[in-house]
């Protein structure tokens, strides 16, 4: 049963040490453990268990800066190009090239934006019909 301790036979080479330890008081045993830990650089404490992932997720601080990534331009491509031009101060051709490239793979429009700014940019793109992610 769970409460019963497994009886382990003491090997002959350890009988003398085990006999000496069994005669010690609890305080002496505690001191002996500390001496052995220091001597051999080990710890008698059980290792800590890993924290559940939900707790770890709560402990991580919220990001302070985000990259705004254009994942798909949507049906109103011209509107999306206008938003890109306004945000990036790029020319018409560069803005169009960025929007066209986003059809093949996601394109970073703005790097290191603060949360509020990133949310505003996302709203502008979504109003123009584009799909955007904050990373």
Image (spheres, rainbow, N blue to C red):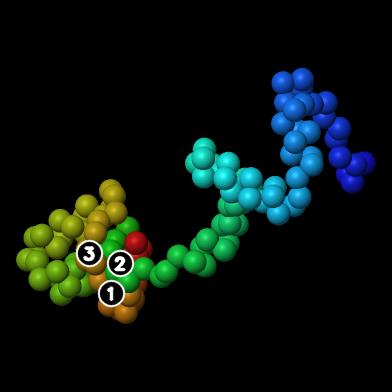
Residue 118 makes an appearance in the image: no
Which residue sits at x=72%, y=26%? 14
Q: x%, y% of residue 76?
A: 28, 67
Q: x%, y% of residue 67?
A: 28, 64
Q: x%, y% of residue 65?
A: 29, 69
User: Quick one: label 2 or label 3, which is nearer the N terminus?
Assistant: 2
Which residue sits at x=78%, y=33%? 19
User: Quick one: label 2 or label 1, which is nearer the N terminus?
Assistant: 2
> On the image, numbered disc 2 is attached to which residue?
66
**What whole-number distance in Å separates the C-alpha atoms at marks 2 and 1?**
6 Å
Count of residue discs = 3
Which residue sits at x=75%, y=45%? 24
Q: Quadrant of residue 130?
A: bottom left
Q: With respect to residue 34, does 82 lie above or below? A: below
Task: Classify mark 2: residues with Cα within 10 Å, few (<14), some (14-19) or many (20+).
Answer: some
> On the image, numbered disc 1 is attached to which residue?
114
Viewer-closest of 25 and 30:
25
Task: Classify mark 3: residues with Cα within 10 Å, few (<14), some (14-19) or many (20+).
Answer: some
Q: With respect to residue 106, does 61 lie above or below? A: below
> On the image, numbered disc 3 is attached to which residue?
111
**What whole-number distance in Å separates the C-alpha atoms at marks 1 and 3?**
9 Å
Viewer-closest of 131 and 10:
10
Residue 21 makes an appearance in the image: yes
Which residue sits at x=76%, y=50%? 25
Q: x%, y% of residue 36?
A: 58, 41
On screen, residue 54 versus residue 74, left or right, reads right
Q: Are marks 1 and 3 in contact (CB under 8 Å)?
A: no
On screen, residue 71 versus residue 109, left or right, reads right
Q: Quadrant of the C terminus?
A: bottom left
Q: With respect to residue 104, does 5 lie above or below? A: above
């Amino acid at each position: 049963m769970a409460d019963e301790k497994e009886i382990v036979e003491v090997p002959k080479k350890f009988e003398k040490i085990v006999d000496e330890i069994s005669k010690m008081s609890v305080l002496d045993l505690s001191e002996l453990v500390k001496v052995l830990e220091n001597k051999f650089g080990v710890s008698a404490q059980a290792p800590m268990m890993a924290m559940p992932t939900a707790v770890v997720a709560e402990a991580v601080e919220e990001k302070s800066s985000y990259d705004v990534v254009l994942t798909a331009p949507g049906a109103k491509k011209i509107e999306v190009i206008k938003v890109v031009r306004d945000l990036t101060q790029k020319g018409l051709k560069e803005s169009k090239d960025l929007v066209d490239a986003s059809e093949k793979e996601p394109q970073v429009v703005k790097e290191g934006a603060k949360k509020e700014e990133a949310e505003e940019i996302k709203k502008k793109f979504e109003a123009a019909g584009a799909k955007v992610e904050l990373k």
